[in-house]
Image (cartoon, helix red, strand yellow):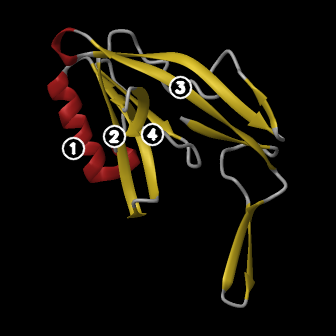
Amino acid sequence: MVVPIVRTGGYIVPMITKLEGHTISVTAGKDFLGYETDYYDVQSSIGSAVTVKFRHAEAVVQGKKSKPKQPALALFDLPPHDGFIRIVYLIRASRHDHDMVVLTSTDENVLRDLTVKTMSNGRDACQTSNRTTCVQIPAGVAVIPEEKVREAGKDQWKAII
């Protein structure tokens, strides 16, 4: 998960766009301080249920690197009984213009039904109940599922979107 760090709060990075002839330049505004990348391990267990556990974080703020002990956002502090999880991309205009939600459930079929409802009706259908959890990922934050693969004798990570 990549979380921008913005001086004024929130997660939307202010951008400055300049047009010079046929060239468009885009830079981050002065409120952008840096970013934090949080890494999680996802492990499966009996019946395809999974657990999500914070592994480590790396932050870069005003050019200085650090290793925070906690994630910037607690998006994956999920109820321990919710063993089925799905990240849903709700496309507004394009692959790059979307909302994201994390859905969990105690039951695989209930998760499927909640996923269909959320995809059909958007964020408004994203509801938490006694059998489900719905966490809306703030605009500006990126969650990119990856899997570890072995290539040329080295471990590498590849996006699984």
Q: Quadrant of the C terminus?
A: top left
Badge 3 vs badge 1, beta-carbon distance below 8 Å: no
Q: Residue furthest bottom?
A: 21
Q: Which residue is mark 1?
A: 116
Q: Position of residue 159 (x, y in %)?
A: 39, 41
Q: Is residue 67 above or below residue 145?
A: above
Badge 2 vs badge 1, beta-carbon distance below 8 Å: no
Q: Amino acid at mark 3?
A: Tyr
| Numbered disc 4: secondary structure | loop
Sequence-first disc among 4 and 3: 3
Sequence-first disc among 2 and 1: 1
| Numbered disc 2: secondary structure | loop
Q: Which residue is mark 4?
A: 144
Query: Nearer the observer, disc 2 or disc 1?
Result: 2
Residue 160 - label: 2
Sequence-first disc among 3 and 1: 3
Residue ID at (72%, 91%)? 21
Q: Which residue is mark 3?
A: 39
Residue ID at (59%, 19%)? 56
Q: Residues within 10 Å of mark 1 (few under 14, many from 20)?
A: few
| Numbered disc 3: secondary structure | strand
Q: Is residue 105 above or below residue 126?
A: above
